[in-house]
Amino acid sequence: MSRTSCTRIRTRLFRRLRRKGEALPGCDSAGVRHVHAESIRFVTDEQKALLRAALLDRTPVQRAARELAIGASTAYRLRDAIAAELAGEGRILPPPRRPGRVRREPARDSSWPPASPQEIYAFRRLLATMGFAEAKTYWQDSRRQAARAAREAAATRRLTFEEQLARVGSGELRITRGFVRNHLEPRLSESWCAEARC
C-alpha cells in the first residue's frame, strides 16, 4: 500500500472521528500526535542520568552522546532541558572542556559505540532487560565475537578466481614460481656418463 493511500485513509478516519467528537489516543482533533507509545527508540532514564552527569563533568555533548549511545540531536535537546532545569534552580551548566584541553584518550574500540541508528536501537532493546554497564559489556563482547568469527571465516574461505585476480591487480598478492624449473636435459653425474660410454 502506498504512502498516499495510507495518508488518505488516515485523513478520512480523523474526519469521521472529529464529527463524532472523538480522537485517536494520544492525538488531538486535528490528528497531530502529542503522546507517543513506549518504544525502544526512547532514551532510557539511566541514559539521561548518565548524560546529565557527563555534562556536569564538562564532557562535550557530542562525545557524551556517542559514549552513551544517544543520538546527537536528542542529546542537544536533553542538554537544553538540563540547562533550563539548572537555570530554574539558579545554577548554570558548566561549559564543556573542548578537545585539546583534556588528556588524550586511547584509540576508540571498534566494538563501541554503536555506529548506526539501527545499532543504537538494538542496544536500547538490551537496556530494557539490563543496566547500562551490563548491556555495554554484553554488546562489546558479542561484537568482538562476531568480528573474530568473520575474520576466521575470511581467512579459511578459498578465494574465487576473480578475487585472486583482483588481489594480484592491487598488488596485495604476487605471482611467484611454485616450482624450480630444471633444465630439460637430465642432470647426470660424470661417473654414470663414463659407465654408459663403456
Image (cartoon, grey):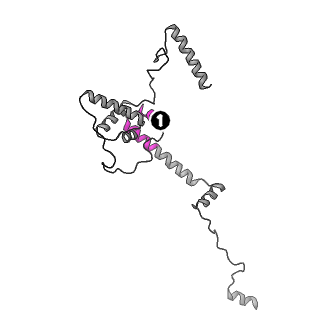
| Residue that label 1 marks | 122
Q: Of helix, strand and loop, which mostly describes the magenta segment? A: helix
The magenta region covers 122-142
Mark 1, residues whose alpha carbon is within 10 Å: few (<14), some, or many (≥20)? some
Is residue 72 in the magenta section?
Answer: no
User: Residue at the top extreme?
Assistant: 20
| As drawn, 162 above or below 130 | below
Residue 85 or 131: which is nearer the viewer? 85
Relative placement, left or right, of 49 versus 40 is: left
Residue lying at 75% horizontally and 88% vertically, measured from the top left = 196
Q: Is residue 130 visible?
A: no
Residue lying at 29% horizontally and 37% vertically, measured from the top left = 56
Residue 146 or 2: which is nearer the viewer? 2
Quadrant housing the C terminus: bottom right
Q: Position of residue 148 (x, y in %)?
A: 49, 49
Residue 30 or 173: which is nearer the viewer? 30
| As drawn, 180 above or below 148 | below
Residue lying at 31% horizontally and 41% vertically, measured from the top left = 96
Q: Position of residue 194 (x, y in %)?
A: 72, 90
Residue lying at 34% horizontally and 33% vertically, measured from the top left = 79
Q: Is residue 5 visible?
A: yes
Q: Position of residue 146 (x, y in %)?
A: 50, 45
Quadrant housing the N terminus: top right
Relative placement, left or right, of 124 versus 94 is: right
Kindly identify the amino acid type of the residue bearing the numbered disc 1.
Ala
User: Residue at the left extreme?
Assistant: 90
| As drawn, 107 above or below 182 | above
Is residue 131 in the magenta section?
Answer: yes
